[in-house]
Amino acid sequence: MLQKQVGLYYFFVILSLLHVNVMCCAEVVEHCCSITSAFLGDNLPNIARDMDTYSYRLPLGVTAGITPFNFPAMIPMWVSSSSSCCCCCLGFHSVSLLALHHSASLR
């Protein structure tokens, strides 16, 4: 009976963490929907005699996202929504092992 209650507790903890991760990702997607106004650039006319300043914002091109093993969904959602607005292409790579594991095996 106690084991069943502990399992149910961990289920609800994981479910609440999943809800928080999805809400964080929704906030990032909402910000990325408004990022097009930031790509307009700036125009500062007459900052000095016969001098104007223009700034252009261009897409980044190809970006990469490395997904850690302990955040399998949150990091790709953040990176993919941002890069779909700011880039032309996105490459993903998932890391299946802990980085400390590789450094310990080299010793």
Image: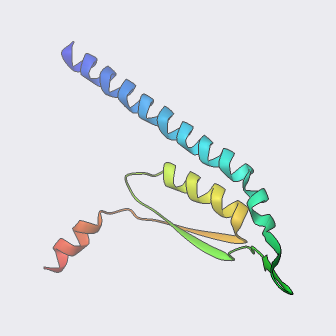
Say which of 27 and 1 sits in front: 27
Q: Position of residue 71 (x, y in %)?
A: 42, 51
Quarter placement of the N terminus: top left
Q: Eyeballing the image, is 106 above or below 88?
A: below
Q: Eyeballing the image, is 89 above or below 2?
A: below
Q: Eyeballing the image, is 25 above or below 54?
A: above
Quarter placement of the C terminus: bottom left
Say which of 66 and 96 sits in front: 66
Query: In the drawing, does residue 16 fall left or right of residue 57?
Result: left
Q: Which colour assignment does the render follow?
A: rainbow
Query: In the drawing, does residue 72 fall left or right of residue 47?
Result: left
Q: Position of residue 76 (x, y in %)?
A: 54, 56
Query: In the drawing, does residue 100 fall left or right of residue 69?
Result: left
Q: Position of residue 65 (x, y in %)?
A: 53, 67
* Residue at 27% from the left image edge and 18% from the top image edge: 4
* Residue at 72% from the left image edge and 61% from the top image edge: 85
* Residue at 33% from the left image edge and 21% from the top image edge: 8
Say which of 3 and 90 sits in front: 90
